């Protein structure tokens, strides 16, 4: 895989993680919104969907030059980013055990990428 693909993968994974934060915000706002039309056009929901559309376009561009087996392991990094962003935005707690798990995810991604 070429260097620009790594930059695109980092952007893709980051957009996925931020989109999940927006989905959480939309879920909270959905509970508070009374009108059906208001529920459909919640800003966090529209933001999340928009990010996912952009991420999908980036993913398609990545797959034009990289094999799926090369690129897909990087999606696992979103499992680390989402809780980090959740800690930052929602003040969720992150334990030492979680940090060890994140380190293992990164090691796993690096192992799978270097195995090619």
Image (spheres, helix red, strand yellow):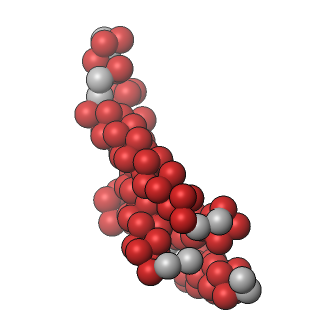
Find residue 31 and report its image quarter.
top left
Q: Position of residue 41 (x, y in %)?
A: 29, 23
Quadrant housing the C terminus: bottom right
Find residue 49 and report its image quarter.
top left
Is residue 67 or residue 33 the one in the foreground?
67
Note whether residue 80 is visible: yes
Find residue 48 and report its image quarter.
top left
Up-down relation of residue 38 to residue 66 (above or below)? above
Note whether residue 82 is visible: no
| In the image, farthest residue toward the right | 115
Q: Position of residue 84 (x, y in %)?
A: 43, 69
Residue at 35%, 34% (x, y): give it.
45
Q: Is residue 40 left or right of residue 114?
A: left
Q: Position of residue 60 (x, y in %)?
A: 51, 51
Is residue 83 or residue 63 the one in the foreground?
63
Q: Is residue 113 left or right of residue 40?
A: right
Up-down relation of residue 13 to residue 36 (above or below)? below
Q: Position of residue 108 (x, y in %)?
A: 68, 81
Quadrant housing the N terminus: bottom right
Is residue 1 or residue 113 the one in the foreground?
1
Q: Is residue 89 left or right of residue 98?
A: left
Residue at 59%, 81% (x, y): give it.
106
């Amino acid at each position: 895989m070429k260097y620009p693909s790594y930059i695109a993968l980092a952007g893709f994974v980051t957009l996925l993680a931020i989109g999940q934060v927006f989905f959480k915000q939309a879920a909270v706002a959905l509970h508070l919104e009374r009108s059906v039309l208001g529920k459909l056009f919640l800003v966090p929901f529209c933001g999340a969907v928009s990010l996912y559309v952009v991420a999908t376009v980036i993913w398609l561009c990545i797959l034009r030059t990289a094999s799926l087996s090369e690129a897909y392991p990087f999606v696992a990094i979103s499992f680390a980013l989402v809780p980090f962003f959740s800690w930052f935005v929602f003040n969720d707690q992150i334990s030492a055990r979680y940090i060890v798990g994140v380190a293992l995810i990164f090691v796993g991604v690096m192992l799978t990428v270097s195995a090619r």
